[in-house]
Image (spheres, helix red, strand yellow):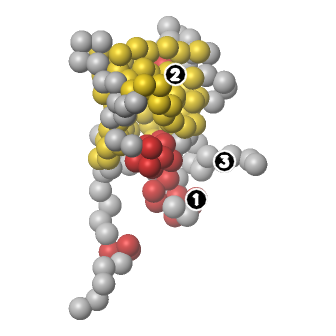
């Protein structure tokens, strides 16, 4: 009997949750460089959910993505959201496309705090939450990135 190898795994859509800082770091890495129109953000006050429909770069594919960069549409959902604030975003312009750089969490009154979505171009979204509860779920099949390029972050 042989041990399973990573290469033997099947490609499947992501469906992940984050309930602590370590989980959130994984989700943040997977959504880095996701792009979405400003019109694809929704906060439902009644259910206390904030959701983004993002076009996520498939970082989990590693070096293979350099030759064939792919994106996939995903839902990024935050639960227990009691307030939303943004800076540097024109939500009314349907042509505004935002690029997500990172997702972080700052405790203010444990287990509550603020989730910060840092955007390219000095934009940010701050979610006041009762506790850290995030879901990332792929909702389409992967597709070739329209730019045909892997995002770069010069140091």
Q: Earlier in the sequence, mark 1 or mark 2?
A: 1
Q: Residue furthest bottom?
A: 1
Residue 48 placement (x, y as % from top left): 29, 19
Q: Residue furthest right?
A: 155
Q: Secondary structure at mark 1?
A: helix
Residue 86, numbered label = none
Q: Earlier in the sequence, mark 3 or mark 2?
A: 2
Residue 11 placement (x, y as % from top left): 32, 61
Residue 47 placement (x, y as % from top left): 23, 18
Q: Label 3 vs label 1: CA separation?
A: 11 Å
Crowd class of label 1 (few under 14; some 14 to 19; many from 20; radius 10 Å): some
Q: Secondary structure at mark 3?
A: loop
Residue 125, numbered label = 2
Q: At 48% across and 43% down in the image, what residue appears?
A: 28
Q: Label 3 vs label 2: CA separation?
A: 23 Å
Q: At 24% across and 12% down in the image, what residue appears?
A: 46
Of tags 3 and 2, which is closer to the observer? 2
Residue 58 placement (x, y as % from top left): 46, 50
Q: Secondary structure at mark 2?
A: strand
Of tags 3 and 1, which is closer to the observer? 3
68 relative to 82 in the view: left or right: right
Q: At 30% across and 51% down in the image, what residue appears?
A: 13
Crowd class of label 2 (few under 14; some 14 to 19; many from 20; radius 10 Å): some
Q: Earlier in the sequence, mark 3 or mark 1?
A: 1
The residue that label 1 is drawn on is: 66
The residue that label 3 is drawn on is: 152
98 is higher (above) or lower (below) than 70:
above
75 relative to 70 in the view: left or right: left
* Residue 24: quadrant of the picture: top left
């Amino acid at each position: 009997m042989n041990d399973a190898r990573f290469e033997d795994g099947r490609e499947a859509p992501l469906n992940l949750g984050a309930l602590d800082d370590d989980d959130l770091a994984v989700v943040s890495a997977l959504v880095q460089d996701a792009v979405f129109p400003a019109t694809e953000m929704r906060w439902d006050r009644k259910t206390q959910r904030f959701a983004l429909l993002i076009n996520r770069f498939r970082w989990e594919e590693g070096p293979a993505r350099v030759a064939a960069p792919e994106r996939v549409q995903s839902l990024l959902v935050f639960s227990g959201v009691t307030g939303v604030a943004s800076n540097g975003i024109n939500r009314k312009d349907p042509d505004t496309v935002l690029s997500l750089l990172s997702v972080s969490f700052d405790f203010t009154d444990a287990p509550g705090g603020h989730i910060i979505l840092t955007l390219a171009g000095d934009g940010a979204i701050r979610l006041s939450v009762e506790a850290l509860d995030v879901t990332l779920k792929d909702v389409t099949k992967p597709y070739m990135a329209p730019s045909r390029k892997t995002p770069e972050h010069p140091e």
